[in-house]
Image (tube, grey):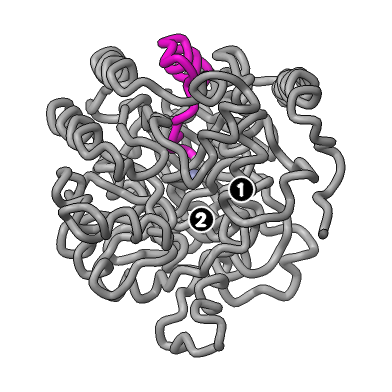
Amino acid sequence: MRILLKNIKALHTCDDRRQVLRGAYLVVDDGVIREVGAGAAPSGVFDREVDLTDCIVMPGFVNIHHHFYQSVTRAVPAAQRGHLIGWLKLVYPIWSKLTPADLAVATSAACAELLLTGCTTTVDHSYLLPGALPEFVDEEVRAALETGIRLHLVRGSLTTFEDDIESELTALLGAKAGGLLDDESLVLSDMRRAAERYHDTSFGSRIQIGFGPTTVTYNNPQFMRDVASLATEFGCGLHTHFHPRTDEREVAGRLPAGNPSGFLKETGWLRPGTWFAHSTRLNDHEIGVLADAGCSIAHCPRMILRLGARVPPIHAYRRRGIRVGVGVDGAASNDAGSMIGEVRLVPLLHRLAGGEGNVPHQEWIDPDDALDMATRVGADILGRSDIGVLAPGMAADVTAFKLDAIGYAGAVVDPLTALILAGSESRSFLTMVNGEIKVLNGALCDQNEDRLRRNLDSSAIRILDEIAPLTGISYEKYPSRI
Ligand SMILES: [Zn+2]
């Protein structure tokens, strides 16, 4: 199919030169970008022409951190107060009731929300797959393919819990924390199965597989080594949460490696294909170690705000040469799942790092940097050279936002600055994946949004009804302040 996108107000190529074309057009043929230019659109026969008057156009966003399954615990009042451990103790019991069918409806809804907010490629760090049932991965892939998004599924695991969570959950839910705690050998064999069945590195591939436990398993270095070996064998990426917290430093300090980054090095995790979620507490030594190893970071600004976490100095990470991409994180630590919403926070949040107003203004991230992080850099972190840039020969992943709402009035100098810093609309006018238009005029083209929402609502209601009598928690009430 030959498609012409025309009358574009401003087109950001996001290539090395960060070109911005005014009065631009873009030609797509058979899922691939053929022409990008400014001025009169090329003549010829097109199967479809889309008028993008008043629109800013850019590569589809690349979301490098998410947990689709958490969409069943969105905006739960009882989980709205408390730092990481207390919050995890509250949400893990709910997640223990998740089935492959629940994961499928959560995937459909999360991917639809991402498409509607400009995202064309997403990671899902899928680490809650009780019993390592193969149906979890199969159902997630099926549901994601149906939405049309590109998925990098990080087959995760939960072989260890933070703090004293395991004993508390086992007392409440039964053996192995109610079945939440994974068996390493089952996880490794399902990781292998997922890679053999789904990992596709061809041009424009829709599904790729990565590996990584939810958190660094300091108590089981061999498991970390085995996962890294699998990644080497299949050419897959590695991904996990890595802040590191004070308790992690204490545990790692008692090991031969002596510290968290030493442990990661010893277990084969420090490599260019590894990207860590958050990294809110890196010290100068660790920043250097990660930069020299070519590792990357997924920055999820709204999660920092939602959980009251430490603000990471991502300007310092970038200055040292660490690639930093953007992720929305799961719905339990970001009740919103909007990709443009996340990108809008990127130029703002890091200015609070340190909390003293002392981040040098010369290092403040501007909207152009935020766009780069959410497109070209994110694609590079995932090892993809076929997306993230609008140029001839690239896969046609495109998003467009219309700047005609009242919130953009007066923002006449620069369309990108207007989109990122002004306006409150979050729906894209157009989202195209592989040359297929998945969103037009702010609506899904081939899915019923209302049905997707109702399906996920049903799962969330069933799960909460099942778990509330066991935990005795009133999830609709905010936690006591006493
Ligand atoms: Zn996360």
Residue 407 vs 208, above or below: the answer is below
Residue 307 sits in which quadrant? bottom right
In percent of the image, x 28 and y 75: which residue is there? 284
Instruction: List x then y, in percent, for residue 279.
Output: 39, 60
Give the residue drawn at x 46%, y 80%.
Answer: 364
Q: x, y (%) of residue 258?
A: 20, 60
> Distance from label 1 to label 2 (Cα)?
10 Å
Choose between 409 and 249: the one closer to the eye: 249
> Tag on residue 333?
1
State left or right for residue 381 relative to residue 406.
left
State which quarter of the image contains the C terminus: bottom right
Magenta segment boundaries in residue numbering: 120-143
Q: Residues within 10 Å of mark 2 (few under 14, many from 20)?
A: many
Relative image position of residue 155 (x, y in whole percent) = 37, 27
Q: Name the amino acid type tagged 2.
A: Cys
**On the image, which quarter does residue 481 sit in?**
bottom right
The earlier-in-sequence mark between 1 and 2 is: 2
Determine whether 52 is above or below 349 in the image: above
Q: Is residue 423 magenta?
A: no
Mark 2 CB near ligand 1 (8 Å cut): yes
Residue 134 showing in the rendered view: yes
Left or right placement of residue 194 versus residue 444 in this view: left
Label 2: element kind: loop
Q: Indicate left or right for 383 with 212 as reference.
A: left
Contact check, label 1 and label 2, Cβ < 8 Å: yes
Tell me if residue 126 is in the magenta stretch: yes
Q: Which residue is mark 2?
A: 300
Q: Residue at x 43, y 17 (%)?
A: 137
The image shows residue 429 at horizontal and vertical percentages of 64, 44
Disc 1 is placed on an element classified as: loop
